[in-house]
Image (cartoon, helix red, strand yellow):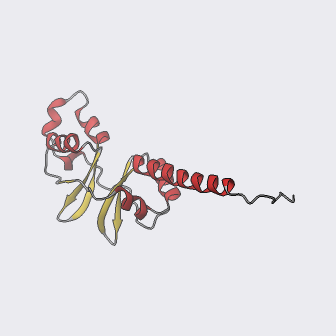
Amino acid sequence: MQVREVLRVKGPGLFTVDPQQTLAEAMGAMAEHDIGSLAVVKDGRLAGMFTFRELLRALHGQPENAALTVGEVMVSEPVVATPEMELDELRQLMVDHRSRYLPVIDDGALVGVISFHDVAKAVLEEQSFENTLLKNYIRNWPEGEKDEA
């Protein structure tokens, strides 16, 4: 399974933020849409990623930091995925870089953000489909055929 298939199943819904927006504004958008990350876009291009991790680090013990801008705390060079990337490669990339969210870039353009939850859901659905096929295969085993081994 490839990243493009996970994005297709996930459906539309790319949420972005401008690097000049405040943490308070970004936090409001994340709460409103029940999401854990925002792609930071400047001049139509990916400028970084802003996640709960950056928000917590900025606000921990310093709630007055809510006036900081997203650009001041975002990950400015995030690890990215491509639509052609296989799911196993993506999972390894996410684990190696401790990333719960990865922007997906196709030909220089941001096409989506994939989360660890999206990956887990896709793997679960794929395994469920394979299990159904195997059960049907076993259930419909022709009578009289014996294992010759």
* Residue extending furthest toward the bottom: 107
Percent position of residue 87, x then y: 49, 58
Q: For this view, does 114 lie left or right of residue 31? A: right
Q: For this view, does 141 lie left or right of residue 55? A: right
* Residue extending furthest toward the right: 149
On screen, residue 5 above or below 94: below
On screen, residue 105 above or below 25: below
Percent position of residue 36, x then y: 30, 43
Q: Residue at x 38, y 58 (%)?
A: 9
Q: Residue at x 59, y 51 (%)?
A: 131
Q: Residue at x 15, y 36 (%)?
A: 66
Q: Quadrant of the C terminus?
A: bottom right
Q: For this view, does 134 lie left or right of residue 31? A: right
Percent position of residue 13, x then y: 26, 56
On screen, residue 23 above or below 8: above
Does residue 80 appear anywhere in the picture? no
**Most foreground residue, 72 or 82:** 82
Does residue 48 appear anywhere in the picture? yes
**Most foreground residue, 3 or 145:** 145
